[in-house]
Amino acid sequence: MRLRTSEEPIDLFIKNGLVVTMDDRLNIYHPGALAIGGNSILAVGPEQDLAPLALKATEVVDARGGAVLPGLINSHTHAAMTLLRGLADDLPLLDWLENHIFPAERRLTGEWVYWGTLLASAEMILSGTTTCCDMYLFEAEAARAIQEVGLRALVGEALYDFPSPNYGPLEKGIETTRDLIRRYRNDSLISVAVELHSPITCGPELLIRAKGLSAECRVPLIVHLAETQDEADQIQDRFGVSPVEHLRRLGLLDEQLIAVHCVVLSETDLETLAAKGVQVVHCPKSNMKLASGVAPVVDLLRRGVSVGLGTDGCASNNTLDLFQEMDSAAKLHKVHHLDPTVMDACTVFRMATRDGARVLGLESRVGSLEAGKKADVIILDLDQPHLVPLYNIYSQLVYAARGADVTRVIINGRTVMKDRRLLTLDLKEILSRANRFAETLRSAGLN
Ligand SMILES: [Zn+2]
């Protein structure tokens, strides 16, 4: 327990829960309690030590039969791609992209991205995600939606060499990114990154420029990297090196870089990513569904690389439920290594919480339940047939729990979901808009 001061007003006191802190010592309190004041955690610890604080709290929540957890962190997604969920599955990659996804994306407008991001936000909150890292088009509209809902997010406009349906020529894309960085500089929930689509779609000039912008503004730089063998082959043909080495030569590799996927890596690439302190995001379900391969995450973790967990977009997943992603992450590496001891449940839960926070540069704010951190907290109902009996909480969370088991979501001290009811958005309206978008694709012959 770390009580900051007993004088601070307590807005919300959660008692009687199984509190999984994910702090440095992986402390678990059962029964445990947690006190929230404003947007921060004031105290967390054993029930018996904190019980007197309940008397001072404006609201007391009895979490008996539930787990109190840090909000989950989706370290990579394309939120508005919820609108393309299930549009065209089980196809060869190029056919899928060129004949289905790209034509559908050309129909997107800022308005549709706004509604698609609201749909994603609803899904994320209902499955216990409190922070996401988003990369898409019309990102100002995505940020507007995320801000209205009250999610925490790192956002950025996807940059590439060819004209974008949003900003047009690249020059405007850089301006769009600068505007976003300025607009959200002091926002309590939203921060902005410079986001590059990939080393194939971004030439050396853009890669270097984006790095310069990220360094100048002191914001993270994000890129899809080494996702497929095809990408590795193309970079080899054009530049004679691997995608990782290509970025190293251009000066992009350092602790500010968040590299998403990292599937096709040589031994040298692994060493380079570790030596440079690059942050990595693992998207196992997307890599499986698109048949990209298995990212060498076990080897990255052994070398001390920070790895977060991401769902990627809904066209290649098809859900944003991080509980499913955790289950897949653990099992994919076990079967790949033919070793059930790799990627244990606690390691995977760390990837979806504190390690994800570190990857996104948000470690001082979120990722664990500790006094002084922002109050991003979820409560999960353990009192259900598929979660009883309970021997090991991490096993239960990774292998048995589902997003639908989350009963309460608090972000930045504000309750945004209670008893499966979303409090900050109009779900009916969002579902209706999403269905309307599907109609526009159908009437254009795109489905
Ligand atoms: Zn992606």
Image (cartoon, rainbow, N blue to C red):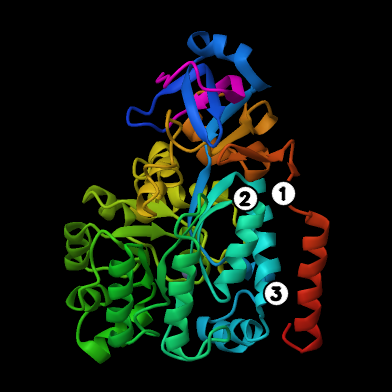
Q: Residue at x 56, y 23 (%)?
A: 9
Element at badge 3?
Answer: helix
Judge from the rendering whether residue 28 lies leftward or rightward of residue 314; answer left or right.
Answer: left
Q: Are marks 1 and 2 in contact (CB under 8 Å)?
A: yes
Using the image, tell me which numbered label, if any, was put on residue 150: 2
In the image, residue 167 above or below residue 298: below
Task: Please give the range of residues in magenta.
Answer: 1-21
Question: Which is nearer the eye, 416 or 399?
Answer: 416
Q: Residue at x 41, y 36 (%)?
A: 346
Using the image, tell me which numbered label, if any, was put on residue 26: none
Mark 1 surroundings: few (<14), some (14-19) or many (≥20) residues within 10 A = some
In the image, residue 352 above or below residue 87: above
Q: For the residue marked with disc 3, what is the amino acid?
A: Glu
Q: Quadrant of the C terminus?
A: bottom right
Using the image, tell me which numbered label, if any, was put on residue 424: 1
Q: Are marks 1 and 3 in contact (CB under 8 Å)?
A: no
Q: Is residue 372 magenta?
A: no
What's the CA distance linking mark 1 and mark 2?
7 Å
What's the CA distance linking mark 3 and mark 2?
19 Å
Task: Locate residue 421: give its quadrant.
Answer: top right
